[in-house]
Amino acid sequence: MNATPELFDYGIQTERSDIRAHVSVVARRIIVFRTKLMLDLIQSRQYQCATATQPGVDGPTAKGYKVPVDDIPDARILLFQSYPWHTFPPQTATTSEKGKAAVVVVCESLRLGRFPLWIEATEDERENIQIKGTDIVIFARQRIQVKCDWFSGRKEWNPLCTGNVYIQTAERNPMRRV
């Protein structure tokens, strides 16, 4: 009898991100939220545990939680119908290929100025700066973690959506993919 391969802590609790962006391919949306608020949420409530697999690998390759979209504090939902979704790799592509494509989607939304950023802004009270036309100074060093979360989202967006986002907390990488 084969033992279940060990999963190692790896996911939202080990990353150094400020913002998470889950790209839902079937819903053509990006679900954006602050990492810290999600960490607090999954530590304070019980969510259904779920595993994930990779084609060609026996046993689970990841573990995490199914968190309903409506439970996510201060989530921002970006409908991105103008993106050329037909260029996104198929669901059968590797996790690496889908992940890279999800990053392209998020970069495009950033380029278009549609991606939300939680920033610190203060009024610049220096008179000589205000006279030159600057009233507000923005501090925005943000780290964004992007996930291809194929079926995430509300069912009313697309009947194939799960109603959740998948928050990974452990994995193993038998295929040695980045």
Image (cartoon, rainbow, N blue to C red):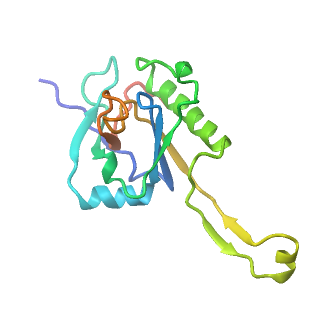
Front-most of 76 and 21? 76
**32 over 135 or under it: above or below:** above
Q: Which quadrant of the view contains residue 74?
A: bottom left
The quarter of the picture where residue 153 lies is top left
Residue at 68% from the left image edge and 65% from the top image edge:
138
Task: Residue at 34% x, 44% y: name it.
Answer: 167
The x and y percentages for residue 50 are: 24, 38
User: 107 and 145: which one is in front?
Assistant: 107
- For this view, does 147 lie left or right of residue 60? right
Work out whether residue 120 or residue 6 is closer to the camera in this orientation and state it: 120
Task: Report how many numbered discs are placed on residues in the image.
Answer: 0
Q: Quadrant of the N terminus?
A: top left
Viewer can see residue 17? no
Pinpoint residue 161: horizontal percent, then vertical percent.
Answer: 33, 32
Q: Is residue 41 above or below residue 26?
A: below
Q: Where residue 16 sits in the image (x, y, percent)? A: 49, 54
Q: In the rendered image of this protein, does residue 57 appear above or below residue 125?
A: above
Q: Position of residue 70 (x, y in %)?
A: 32, 50
Q: Is residue 15 visible?
A: yes
Could you tell whether 119 is left or right of 14 in the image? Answer: right
In the image, residue 102 above or below residue 45: above
In the image, 140 versus 155, the foreground residue is 155
**View extreme (left): residue:** 1
Q: Residue at x 41, y 20 (%)?
A: 91
